[in-house]
Amino acid sequence: MITLKNDDPEVWHAIQNEVERQQNTIDLIASENVCSPAVQEAQGSLMTNKYAEGYPSKRWYAGCGNVDTVESLAIKRAKQIFGAEHANVQPHAGSQANMAVCFAVLKPGDRILGMDLSHGGHLTHGFKKNFSGMFYDIVHYGVEKETGYIDYDKVRTIAKNTKPQLIIAGASAYPRILDFERFKKIADEVGAYFMADIAHIAGLVVGGVHPSPIPYADFVTTTTHKTLKGPRGGLILCKEKYAKQIDSIIFPGIQGGPFMHIIAAKAVAFKEAMTEGYKECQQQTVRNAKAMAQEFIKRGYNLVSGGTDNHLFLIDLHNKGMTGKDAQLLLESVDIILNRNTIPFDERGANEPSGIRIGTPTITSRGMKETEVTKIAECIDKVLSQPNDFRIKEEIRKTVRDICVQFPLYKKEAYQSVE
Ligand SMILES: *Cc1c(COP(=O)(O)O)cnc(C)c1O
């Protein structure tokens, strides 16, 4: 980044510091991951210069031959890795993908049944201050207090009583397998569209470690930057019969020119997703989450639903006498990065909730396995158990540093090319 260093040292410095931060901390934020240098190169390319309103070979501007090539590749590969009939690779983010589906099939005031935000759902599934909560009549399902699992009979009862036009399955903080087939049956019974939002678990679906919603859902939306390991962006998959509707709601409905540099990077990421190494990484992500969850349980922590089937789990800190915010700050001070999170039926607000969320995508992409995740759980336990012992903090900071050196963010050559 020689040019940037010369032309804008302030931004260059911030980026260098971010390289250091990512390299030297353990990232357990479940929605983050590490994308490859190839993805970053495509994302950093001059395709950002190009206006390409429309779709491949149906553009409004001249000069679109090369961006047509990358968008066609991205579409073809997305369809291939998910086994989908149609793909729209233009959504700028997961939120835009969800907005597109809502706008495509609903009228303002229509009813959506989605997962409660405080039980693990997403803002776009009906939060009051989100477009979804502003434009639609929202009803929620959640998890059971005793088990932490979704009770599908209850979802069915709510659906029958409220008759939504759209049912959304998907979550940002649900550690268990989602039964898409069951959701589809419920949607059919009440005549609702069924959308699966797999923003968090898309990589697991491609890797074969979470059932795919493709056979059941009318619409599947996702981000491309979470477990999927691509650039920051969104993606919609649907049956061919909805293709025109979805494409025209993305453009010209809610977006203008697509981000062609991001779409190029999506194409690269989707190709990577076809490799054995990618599948192995997704499988290891789940193995790591399970091993780490087990270690916390052994050490006396309460996990929502008692464990995990996927890449994340939630720790209920009630019996530890601290809030999720306390834990987040404390762990940040020893270079372990995660986020506070409400737990289902939390009596505290979202700002100082009772839990933390832990995810294994980033550390798994760095090559960490069961040995390391067990060690990291031990580190977290030590710090949370003795929050005021600064010798312990010093010791943990060293252990974190050692692990980070042993598992570089990128293989040496690639990492150095960023410097
Ligand atoms: C992250 C997420 C989104 C939205 O993604 P953005 O790219 O941040 O807009 C949507 N749905 C779910 C379930 C998510 O976890």
Image (cartoon, rainbow, N blue to C red):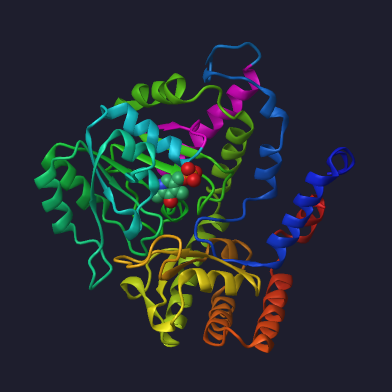
Expressed as whole percent of the image width and height from the top left, the position of residue 385 reads: 52, 86
What residue lies at 44% left-to-right and 56% top-to-bottom?
Answer: 204
Q: Residue at x 29, y 66 (%)?
A: 345
Which stretch is magenta?
A: 64-92
Q: Is residue 198 visible?
A: no
Residue 398 appears in the figure: yes
Q: Is residue 84 magenta?
A: yes
Residue 15 coordinates in the image, percent (x, y): 75, 50
Vertical position of residue 48 compared to residue 346: above or below: above
| Residue at position x 26%, y 65% in the image | 149
Q: Is 327 displayed left or right of 67 in the figure?
A: left
| Image spot of residue 270 (x, y percent) | 54, 43
Relative to 155, residue 312 above or below: below
From the viewer's perspective, is 320 left or right of 111? right
Q: Is residue 40 left or right of residue 146?
A: right
**Residue 196 lies in the magenta-colored region:** no
The location of residue 413, given as percent across then percent down, is 80, 56
